[in-house]
Image (cartoon, grey):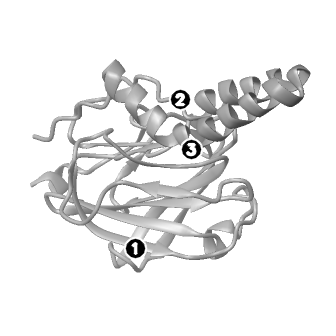
Amino acid sequence: MVFNNENNFSGRVAITLKLAWPFLLILFGLLVVFYFIAPTLMPLPALLAVFIIYFFRNPRRNIPTAENLILSPADGVIVGIDEVYEENFIKGKAIRVYIFLSIFNVHINRSPLQGEVRYRYYRAGRFIPAFKSHASEINEKNYIGIKSNSYKLVVCQITGFIARRIKCWVTEGKKLASGEIFGAIKFGSGAELFIPMESELVVKKGDRVRAGETVIGILPPDELN
């Protein structure tokens, strides 16, 4: 069993600060400069600092414990569900669930199930808006392949027009708990989840999902043996 300790208050705050501190440092510098040359502008960096902390917020999640549940890896809206050939890790047909994250969604990414990272691949690309249908094919992406027992899943972080920085803190061999944080995408983006064809899908296009909390699908019983 892998223990996920990032759902406590101190762990959640630490991740928010880890993501936000470069921006907060710049804004603090602007605040000091405005104090001396333009005091009336001081509220601007202060308000931006509040937004940065809000954007990188890491709210507590009630993570389901059943091992056969496939959880959402990201917050957002499901904008596409289709059947594809996943060539990187599953190397076979899979159900692809595409999630669009607006700038107002939580951008922390979580593992869809308990397992071990067996694959990691970064692909450079462009930065068109993540909601466009062809964004997945040409935008910058980061793939994480997870294996647990006999089944394989793939999570893909995708940058967008505003989001141009993917953060992934896991490498091959890392054991993940279901709902455990593995990375983030900065400022509006997309995420793909590739799951086994035999899975029972319990979401549909247009549904709003929450990382580590919303159940995307249910693995078939024979996949757990």
Circle 2/circle 3 CB separation < 8 Å? no
Amino acid residing under circle 3: Pro
Disc number placed over residue 121 in the picture, else none:
1
Vertical position of residue 82 compared to residue 72: above or below? below
Residue at (45, 77) in percent of width and height: 85
Amino acid type indicated by mark 2: Arg
Q: Which structural element holds mark 3? A: helix
Q: Going by the image, does 142 lie left or right of 76?
A: left
Residue behind mark 3: 22
* Measured Cα–Cα span from mark 3 to mark 1: 26 Å
Tell me the element at label 2.
loop
**Mark found first going from the N terminus, 2 or 1:** 2
The residue at 41%/22% (across/down) is: 60
Q: Amino acid at mark 1?
A: Tyr
**Which of pointers 2 and 3 indicates the residue nearer the eye?**
3
Residue 15, x across and y down, in percent: 41, 36
Q: CA distance from mark 2 to mark 3?
A: 15 Å
Q: Position of residue 61 (x, y in %)?
A: 39, 25
The crowding category of the residue bearing disc 1, from other C-alpha atoms within 10 Å (few below 14, some 14 to 19, many at least 20), is: some
Q: Nearer the viewer, mark 3 or mark 1?
A: 3
First of labels 2, 3 by sequence position: 3
Residue highlighted by disc 2: 57
